[in-house]
Image (cartoon, helix red, strand yellow):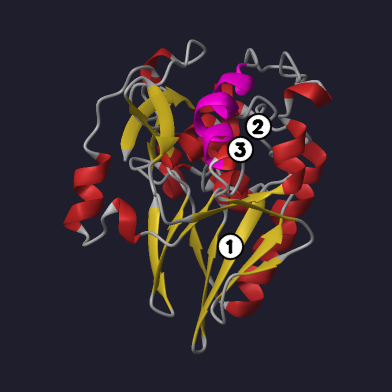
Amino acid sequence: MAGARRSGRGGLPRLRPEKWQEHSSWVAPHFWAGETDNYLAATQTWVVRSTGRVILVDTGLGNHKERSHMPAWTHLETDFIDRLAAEGVRPEDVDVVVNTHVHADHVGWNTTLRDREWVPTFPNATCLIHRDDFEYWNRRNGVPKRGRHRGCQRRRRQRADVEDSIDPVHRAGQTLLWESSHHIDGNLQLEPAPGRTPGSAVLHLRSGTEWALFVGDLLRTPLQILEPHVDTCLSEDQRAAAKSRRRVLEYAADTNALLGPPKPP
C-alpha cells in the first residue's frame, strides 16, 4: 500500500540493459519508465476470504519502524488500518496472516507500536511463517551481515525487522512454523519456493476450477516471466530462486492460474 521508484537495472544486475528495451511492451509505462530507468513497485497486502475466515497475505511495511537501510521505509505514517476497514476488515477480524517470507516489506504490519511496545496488530490471528525463515534470521544461528551477490549494495539489517515484527508475535504465541507444506483449508495451500529466502513460499488458491498463486517476491517484475533465470541481487540463493520461479511459472501455465505478485504498480 505504498509505492516507491527504484532503478530497474540496479535490482536485476545480471539482466542485460538491452533486455529492458526488448521487452518494453511488458513493462512500460506501468512497471518501468524507460526515460529514467525507474520502476514503480507497490508494497501491499492481499485480503482473502475463505471458508468464513479472513486471511491476509503479507503485511507490508508497518508504521513507526526504524529501517536505516531504507529511508523511504522509515517511521511511516500510512492509513493501512483505515484501508483495511474500508474493505470490511478490522484487525480483530483477521484469522490468519501469511508471511510469504521474512523481509521488512512483507512483515511490517504484523505488529503495532502501543505504549512504546510492539504488539500483534491482529490479536486473533495465527501467523504462518516457514520454519526455515524463522530459524535463518534467528540471532543465535548467525544472521548474515551483508548481501553476498555482485551488483547488490544491500547491507543486512534483517535482525531489526525480526525484533519488531516477528518476535513479538511469536512471544504472544500466535505463530505457526510450518515446514514441507501447510494446508490452511480446502481452498488454500502453502508450498515452499526457496531462494529469495530459505523459507520463501507460494500460496495456492483454488476456487472451483480456477486457480491463483500468491507468489511473494518470486516475481519482482514481469521481465522475470520472460527471463525466469534472472534473479534480483537481494535473494539469498539466486539459483534456487530461479529454479523455484521456473517451477511455479510452469505450474501456472499448466493450470491457467492467475499470478498475484506482492508489488504491482
Horizontal arrangement in the rendering, residue 262 relative to residue 113 (left or right): right
Can you say which quadrant of the picture contains the C terminus? top left
The answer to whether residue 195 shows anywhere in this view is: no
28 or 128: nearer the viewer: 128
Check residue 240 for magenta coloring.
no
Task: Find residue 15 and name its label.
Answer: 2
Dot 3 or dot 1: first in sequence order is 3
In the image, which is nearer the foreground, mark 3 or mark 1? 3
Q: Residue furthest bottom?
A: 208
Amino acid on which the number 3 mark rests in the picture: Val
- Indicate whether 18 appears above or below 216: above
Circle 3 crowding by C-alpha within 10 Å: few under 14, some 14–19, many from 20: many
Circle 2 crowding by C-alpha within 10 Å: few under 14, some 14–19, many from 20: some
Task: Find residue 203 and name its label.
Answer: 1
120 or 13: nearer the viewer: 120
Horizontal arrangement in the rendering, residue 33 relative to residue 255 (left or right): left
- Indicate whether 155 appears above or below 126: above
Amino acid on which the number 2 mark rests in the picture: Leu
The answer to whether residue 34 shows anywhere in this view is: yes
Can you give x and y, in whole percent of width and height, for residue 254 in the image?
A: 66, 77
Q: Residue at x 64, y 32 (%)?
A: 232
Residue range highlighted in magenta: 157-169
Horizontal arrangement in the rendering, residue 249 relative to residue 51 (left or right): right
Q: Residue at x 58, y 33 (%)?
A: 167
* Residue at which label 3 appears: 102
Majority SS type along the magenta span: helix
Q: Secondary structure at mark 1?
A: strand
